Amino acid sequence: MAEAAIIDGKAFAASLRARIARQVAALVARDGATPGLAALLVGDDPASRLYVRNKSRALAEAGMGSWQHLMPADATQDAVMAKVAELNDDPKVDGILVQLPLPEQLDAAAVLNTIDPAKDIDGFHVVNVGRLATGQEAMVPCTPLGCLMLLRDRLGELKGLDAVVVGRSNIVGKPMAQLLLAAHCTVTMAHSRTRDLPAVCRRADILVVAVGRPEMVRGDWIKPGAAVLDVGINRVERDGKTRLVGDVAFAEAREVAGAITPVPGGVGPMTIACLLLNTLTAACRRRGLAVPEAA
Ligand code: GUN
């Protein structure tokens, strides 16, 4: 069998970002107000700082505003919720992102549920989770939304396909399963306690893996011809160098799959592109304007 096609998330995300930039320019020309996102970062975790900085840069490149709000690692629940409430009331702010993880003393769910659901560009508020689960208009979490776009681009119609999602996080696994279900796939959610995980994965026409375990999914877990989306980004030491690898053993999987995302350059770039998309979507909805196509 031929080697798998590589799903080039980097190129797909670049063209999506260019389209969003054009749509933002059209919106600003029409409405005057620049769409913008406020990011709230609590504490000084270096990885989180880098993520927030990258998100801000991408927003600026698309012509959108971004504001970073930094709070100390020992911030109280009341102080963080008061900051979110202030951003809810700020008419300049179309989207609010609370960078996760939050420091341990904070109740993350309570913070997320304080965000105005219309500004919840991560789609983590229970109202958006419920809307997605019941087929209503929702803000959809960025990483699974990006995965769905890549799958539709590659496979077209998804109806009737067997999809297996490995990992049950609120950020990726659960919303991914909801999106695939809404696309009429037969969905299995697998996780660390699943019995005979390799056999479950082998059923999948679509395999989405988001577990955070380097190269856990082996080549012989994959159904020949399957589409494999690898959400993992793991830093490993190899030959004295630090490398990024996914949750799927790429070289092995590539021999069996029909299409596969690389790490880096697969799902990762789609997360940021979908953050821009969700910010534009929120801005259009708040202004009572039609949401642009593909948004
Ligand atoms: N931390 C890891 N992934 C995410 C994400 O998608 N959104 C936010 N806000 N924090 C994260």
Image (tube, rainbow, N blue to C red):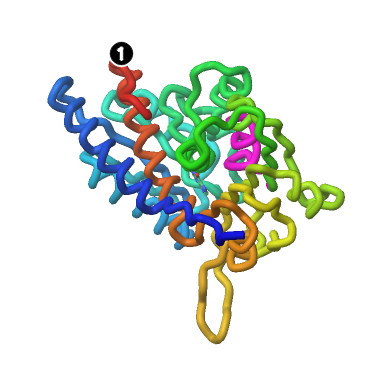
Residue at far top of view: 288
Relative vertical location of residue 96 with respect to residue 133 in this rendering, above or below: below
Mark 1 lies on residue? 288
Residue 279 % position (x, y): 35, 32
Residue 195 point in image, percent of width and height:
86, 49
Q: Which residues are magenta?
A: 167-179
Which element is circle 1 on?
loop
Tell me where residue 273 sits by quadrant.
Answer: top left
Q: Is mark 1 within 8 Å of ligand 1?
A: no
- Give the side of residue 202 with respect to residue 85, left or right: right
Q: Is residue 43 visible?
A: no
Between 40 and 152, which is closer to the camera in this rendering?
Answer: 152
Residue at the farthest front position: 1
90 left or right, relative to 272 = left
Q: Position of residue 192 (x, y in %)?
A: 78, 51
Q: Residue at x 55, y 29 (%)?
A: 125
Compared with residue 243, is residue 197 higher up or lower down, i.e. above or below? above
